[in-house]
Image (cartoon, rainbow, N blue to C red):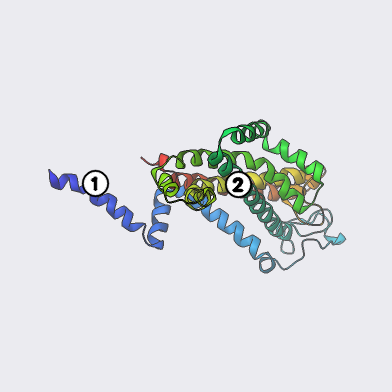
Amino acid sequence: MAAVDEQPEVAIQGARDERVTFWGGLSYFFREHPLGAIGAGITLVFVFVALFADLITGSDPTTTNASSSLARPGAEHWLGADFMGRDMWSRIVYGARISLVVGIGSAALGAFIGVIVGLATGYIGGWFDLIIQRIIDVMQALPLLVVALLMAAALGPSLVNTIIAISIPLIPQTARVIRANTLTLREMPYIDACKAFGYSQWRIAVVHILPNTIAPLIVLGTAKLGSAILTEASLSFLGLGILEPHPSWGRMLSESAAEYVRTAPWLVIYPGIAISLVVFGTNLLGDALRDILDPRQTN
């Protein structure tokens, strides 16, 4: 009977040992979370294309050529050319760089402010927490795109303003998640021990509480990356995002959807596929990270 009872413990220990090494952890991730591995692969390809856009494509995405206007996909232009003769392959590749900068920038800025707000309200509590939470309730009552539209219209279209406009509506959910974790952690015995040692409130909050909120923050940040990229595409589609001549997937759709969807469908298809793949990949990766890092998801 003892030998039978030891078998599950041996299996669990073997799984833990397998995840100790990098390749063992990678193998475990691919085997236990295949959809997450697909999402990670799509995301890594997207990051690689954005970082090495200069090497992947040899043409300038802003260079116009009247003789190549609305050229069909072929040897000279792999994905065709737009109405100004600009190579669509180059614009798709460089558009990945714009989406990466806006997505990571807005998600990071929103997470940074959300962490500060959530940590402060959760640890301080009292009337300060009550007032801030009512403001967050108002912000969460509006959809992300609506708030981003309002901010973009007020700030004006540009790369920096787009990042700020998208980061603002990302703050409330991050603040709520960090606040919930802070409320739980501040009642833990080790926090009482820190207070007994005479540690300052600032040190307790930043050194002993904040690091224990990193796991849910990573999950939330990865999930919000796709939302930020999709929101940037929506703002650019409406003319409130990235300005010309910088290539943006949403701007490409805006320029082509109405006039050229029948005569030059490749102008709409390829930017749409790029947006869909990136959002799909980041969402799959975010779901897998949630299953791994959130203990409540384990069986």
State whether residue 161 is above or below residue 58. Answer: above
Mark 2 is surrounded, within 10 Å at the Cα level, by few (under 14), some (14 to 19) or many (20 or more) other residues, namely some
86 or 292: nearer the viewer: 292
Please provide percent x and percent y for residue 257: 78, 43
Please provide percent x and percent y for residue 88: 74, 57
Circles 2 and 1, Cβ within 8 Å, touching? The answer is no
Residue 125 tag number: none
- Which residue matches tag 2? 116
- Asked if residue 169 shows in the view, the reply is yes
Which residue is painted at 58% across and 43% down in the image?
Answer: 120
Please tell me whether mark 1 sits on a helix, a strand or a loop.
helix
On screen, residue 169 versus residue 198, left or right, reads right
Q: Quadrant of the N terminus?
A: top left
Which residue is painted at 28% across and 50% down in the image?
Answer: 12
36 or 104: nearer the viewer: 104
- Which residue matches tag 1? 8
Sequence-first tag of 2 and 1:
1
195 or 39: nearer the viewer: 195
Viewer-side label of 2, 1: 2
Which residue is painted at 68% across and 46% down in the image?
Answer: 167
- Which amino acid does the dot numbered 2 rest on? Ile
Spatial separation of the CA atoms under disc 2 and disc 1 = 43 Å
- Asked if residue 261 shows in the view, the reply is no
Please provide percent x and percent y for residue 182: 50, 42
Q: Quadrant of the C terminus?
A: top left
Which residue is painted at 71% across and 46% down in the image?
Answer: 232
Please provide percent x and percent y for residue 70: 81, 54
State whether residue 122 is above or below residue 95. Answer: above
- Which amino acid does the dot numbered 1 rest on? Pro
115 or 124: nearer the viewer: 124
Please tell me whether mark 2 sits on a helix, a strand or a loop.
helix
